[in-house]
Image (tube, rainbow, N blue to C red):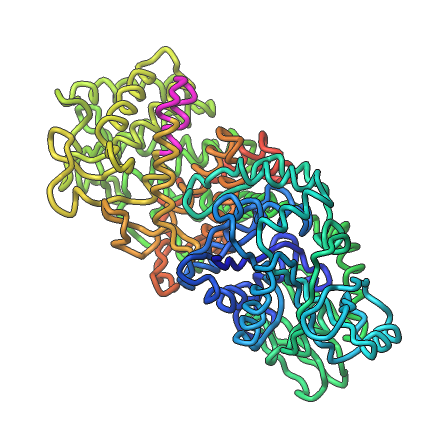
Amino acid sequence: MAFYPVIMCGGAGTRLWPASRAARPKQFLDLTGGESLFRQTVRRVAPLAGADGHVLIVAGVSHLPALRRQLADLGVPAVLLLEPEARDSGPAMAAAAAWLAARDPDAVAAFVASDHHIPDAEAFRAALAEAGDHARQDRIVTLGVQPTEPSPAYGYIRPAGPGAAPVAAFVEKPDRDTAARWIGEGYLWNSGNFIVRAAVLGEELAAHAPEMAAAAAAAARTARPDPVDPERVLTLGPVFREAPKLSIDYAVMERTDRAWVLPVSFAWSDLGAWDAIARVADGPAGGGRWLGEPDSGCHIHAPAGVTVATVGVRDVAVIVEPDAVLVCALDRAQDVKGVAQRAGAGAGDARLPPLADAATAFAVWMRTAALPLWSTLGVEADGAFAEAIDARGRVPVAPRRARVQARQAYVLAHAGAAGWRGPWREVVRCSLARFAETNVRPDGLYVTLTAADGRVLDDTAALYDQAFVLFALAAAARSGIEADAARARAHALWATLATRRLPQGGWREAGTYPYQSNAHMHLFEAALAWSAVDPAGPWNALADEIAELCLTRFIDRDGGFLREFFSADWSPAEGPDGRLVEPGHQFEWAWLLTRWAVLRGRTDAEAAARRLFQVGARGVDAARGVAVDALDDQLAVTSARARLWPQTERLKAALLLAERNPDDRAAYLAEAAAALAGLELYLRPNGTWRDKLNPDGSFVDEPAPASSFYHIFAGWEQLAAAAAVLPELAGADAALA
């Protein structure tokens, strides 16, 4: 019989507030001065899986990004079974047992908590192996820990005899005097670990909790593969929400006649409160610094960069978080749960869903830092836009690229249309007027590069730049900035571009890579923008032409990924150029194709977009939580550097796909939350950002490039659109007004 460690990741750890929250429960935190409890648990139980088994992890859908990050470098094969809604330990174990039994009728499951402290991993594994022998005799075995003190923090088990024995009774947490009496009578601490054949647990659930068993089994049968990692991540079917919300103790263990307990004597703690943490922690945790008396019995938890000093106090916990500080006597640690409940109802901790909370913070940064900075310091005296701003708010002197002028005009015009009250209208009007003076060629196309005095430095008319000029003009028309003139300029530009269409379809780009997908992507985006404000123009036909080129040529027919560079007949280019796959462009095309597919009713294009998103996700470095720059056509990483812009494209695509795919909404929203968390790594509080994240986690020291603002702002736009329609984002304040 194969052995399957099943790690249970439920619980919010409210007695460990303010470090443990619903969005970041205790199992994912460094609470003891080492690695997270979850990672310790994975390392502890993985050797038990052997060649025929595997590790199964049961967690909430909102935990998926944290799970991916924490599993990234452990090298442990694991299957993630995600709950669409927390229903307590009974339904979670029932679903896992049903899923295992359907795949291996003889499976022996060891259900272990993800947040316990067990320093002797070898002794723990030996106990599980011994319990497995009893489980193979159709017993449900729990580990009973030999008490070391009369603790009122734990439930207790009364065994029917010495050694491995039937359970005579499970009893709730007692007072200290009762606990002392029970210990004298041979009671054991209830560790909450269970070892049982999956089929046996199913039988007992059917007998004692039939509604739970039926809902959990149906949820396991209808589990949906994750759209990003279908082989290893599954979300239980929505019927899981109908399972009665009960612990496994109430549902089965207190009713079954198959319950056995195996006494164990290794050190164990469920780390349920700060006093328990203090007993096992190796100095201050969380990365912070403590100035105090080592023998004072205090426990300090603070983030990196924070110093906590204590003078003249003993046996207290000081827990520092960015939005809350807890100071409590360690002998009152069990009372923290009440404080956490009161804090959760107050203004200091609105308890928004994690993505909604992050969306609100992102919008605040946009309207109070980024937009004010780039509409003032980011605008030159003659009305042109600056190329960059450094971290100290200074503007380096640099030539002016056409794409930056167009992108910044788009950002501010759309910000104004969204209700932002800054000086957007006059800034956009002046910038477009200046741009028309300095950048238009005699043939109506726009030059690539000019000097600050207006001199042309490079008169190349790149397709990429023409696309962004069209995009900026569409933004001006949409915002009511000389709309008729913007439309006339766009039509004139298109008239020239139309004459340059290639016989085989598409356009030739200037420079080293004449046949590429990227320039077409931005022309596609401009066409979609213009079709919304000028539906009678040529834009719908242009969008359709590029979409078909993407679906038939740019996307590899077998692999479903989008290539970057091509030969003249739109077959893949020779050599490494033809094998280049950029995760950011997989996400960006997925977002654009989905928008186009919705307009045209093209389910095939939506399917292609979902596949592109899957490919892009293969380029996410779980350890850093970011999408890297480049893969090859075998989807192996060829550049682990991670620029800012792929993070925004991952966010946009995940949010739109969440809207369009309700059955996979939770998975896509988890991706969106992870993408936004990755993006936040790059953003500075003053409205600037870093652009390039190195593989070692350091950033390239350089001014913030203005060209990134287009990506950042488009990410905000999609986030605001999602907040208006998705109930999971209902609490977000994503507006710019």
Q: Which residue occupies 19% across, 33% down? A: 461
Q: Residue furthest right?
A: 177
- Residue 719 location in percent, x, y? 52, 37
Q: Residue furthest top?
A: 536
Residue 361 as seen in the image, left or right of residue 455: right
Corner quadrant of residue 580: top left
- Residue 598 location in percent, x, y? 43, 22
- Residue 84 location in percent, x, y? 59, 41
Query: Which segment did they paint magenta?
Result: 590-605
Pick the quarter of the image with the C terminus.
top right
Residue 159 as seen in the image, left or right of residue 506: right
Whether residue 397 is visible here, answered yes or no, is: yes
Residue 199 as seen in the image, left or right of residue 339: left
Q: Which residue occupies 51% across, 43% down? A: 102
**How many marks can you see?**
0
Residue 568 as seen in the image, left or right of residue 308: left
> Foreground: 227 or 52?
52
Above or below: residue 316 compared with residue 524: below
